[in-house]
Image (tube, rainbow, N blue to C red):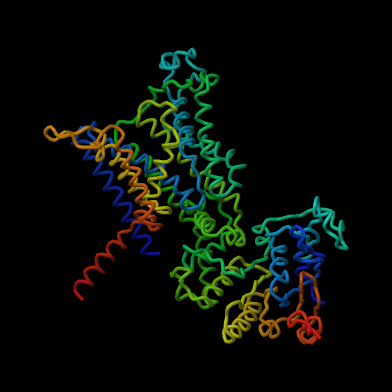
Amino acid sequence: MNTKKRGLVIGLILLALLFAGLYILENTISSSTMLITILKKGVIYALIAVSMNLLNGFTGLFSLGQAGFMLIGAYTYAILTIPVNMRGMIYQYYDGGIVQFALPAIIGILCAGLLAAFFAFLVGLPVLRLKSDYLAIATLGFAEIIRAIIQYEGLGPLTNGSNLLRRFPTFQSVLYPFAAAAICIGAILLLINSTYGRAFKAIRDDEVAAEAMGINLFFHKQLSFVVSSFFAGIGGALLAMYQGSIQVATFKSAMTYEILLIVVIGGMGSVTGSVIASFLFVASSEWWLRFLDNEMFIGTFQVPLLRSGFRMVVFSVIIMAVVLFYRRGIMGDKEFSLTRVRNRLLNRKAGRNA
Amino acid sequence: MPEKMLELNDITMQFGGVVAVNNLSMYIGKGEIVALIGPNGAGKTTAFNCVTGVYKPSNGQVKYQGQVIVSNHPAGKMKALYAGENRDRYPHVVDPTPDKITRMGIARTFQNIRLFKTQTVFENVLIATHLHRTSNPISAAFRLNWREEQKMRELSLEMLDFVGLSAMKDELATSLPYGKQRRLEIARALATRPKLLLLDEPAAGMNPQETADLAQFIVEIKERFNLTIFLIEHHMDLVMDISERIYVIDFGKLIAHGEPHEVQDNPDVITAYLGVEDI
């Protein structure tokens, strides 16, 4: 118990240091540098990846609906928070739309999560009775259907059809997404470590035994699905804030696969793994591997293969390599802990001395 | 006669044309140890699964403490196939899921051990205390109920102590030797605080010494937790030593029942176990 409390204190101190570091960083370098962009996008992806991991890694439900719930979250946020005087311009084809009020950003974000959770509840009723691949197909289908519905002309006054939504409140400081993600990931961690989280893991390990221990399978699957979607909705709202404008085309199933890739690389069933992998993924795709998309000349020699789209080829190869040789991901189902790092270092030292 | 804890009335389980359990009726009195025995494939585990809600019986009824917990009658295609004497005797259908049955106070272990593989010994038992929670997900996540959490941990530790596994509580459940995994399964079942414990072939794969220890252990559990025990086994030694009454089934049909010595001398039972001599 005591070590646990100490761990909590150390964790909080590290978190405070992280925020102090971010604050200093932000005030020393320009906010348009790549690093700041990566940090903002990375932390939002981290929240979404952790929410997906709750479902796929901890409850063992292979769902591919994450982009759909992010889409619901992003649109809910945008629709509810665009200032009234901007609506005429944005909903230019729909006479300013039917929503004629604007909520504060925080309430918009909460509504984004709640509506995503509500849809998850409805979808979960039939879909969670399916197993493994069938569940994946059904949730993927749901995400595509939601995308089609939002694009539907008839809903234009509400969703602006397939046109952009913009001019909703966004954030400038990098601290904003970090604070939101820290609160959300903290809540997910608390749930995972509670008695309900233990029930989730029991269902993942052995459904028959879990049911024989008095765990109501459907209720717990539904709970995990709703909570995961709630945070995916919030993640979607934050992503909308980060991008400044949204349209449905952003939330294709490719986005779900990106998140799934992060979860697998980080390790199914590891929250810290998902967080680490999110930053790695975003940094690679936006920054470190960008050069792959540009033609490069050394003198007059053109480096072969490098051209627009080659980055995605490299990504595919990385996925295959991870699935073939590194299936447990960076963290497996373990969490990052300072004690483990220390023990490993001490062991190595002891090994050298012996 | 003691109060009836569990009662099976005309339980029939049909898989298409195969009748796995055929009009099985039996009862278990409060505080008894009762065994259901029979050769391989006789339908013992199927009968068990009808009680615990894994299968819906094709016909018949299960009562627990006088209350009907499972009830069914043959329907559709089964109705045409089923030629049992008690068809249509159980008009209403009650078909609960296994988790509901466990919450009523019936816990079970599995023939082929089913532990939570990625969890430690302690966590395996802790999961079984989840069913008596009073907290909702939010109060559980934000530790508004830390007293309950503490109680769950205490109960789990107590169970591990009782089965003698507390020294290895932080090891991975699957890293335990076979016999200890069986004990862990029993500890896990006990942590659900049952009144009736169903043991599915607890001595499977054990040597004679381990089997003898287990027999003693089962009696100990019964005394300590004031339990009723329903046991499936085909190790005759274990069954003869500890059960008060024995039911014998073969090809799904009850062929004998009574006290151990009565059953032992029953010619039908001997035939079922040893076969008939062809002349």
Lateral position of residue B209 relative to residue B176, left or right:
right
- Nearest to the observer: residue B188 or residue B231: B231
Q: Is residue A305 above or below residue B13?
A: above
Q: Residue at x 40, y 48 (%)?
A: A263
Instruction: Point out the image quarter for the C terminus of chain A.
Output: bottom left
Q: Is residue A237 above or below residue B215?
A: above
- Nearest to the observer: residue A189 or residue B19: B19
Q: Residue at x 52, y 63 (%)?
A: B116
Residue B69 in sight here? no
Lateral position of residue A62 relative to residue B69, left or right:
left
Q: Is residue A307 above or below residue B146?
A: above
* x then y, percent, for residue B45: 69, 68
Q: Residue at x 43, y 25 (%)?
A: A81
* x then y, percent, for residue A117: 52, 39
* x then y, percent, for residue B97: 67, 56
Toward the left, the furthest residue is: A299
Lateral position of residue A240 relative to residue A111, left or right:
left
Instruction: Point out the image quarter for the N terminus of chain A.
Output: bottom left
Q: Residue at x 73, y 71 (%)?
A: B42
Q: For residue A326, what is the image quadrant?
A: bottom left
Toward the front, the furthest residue is: B279
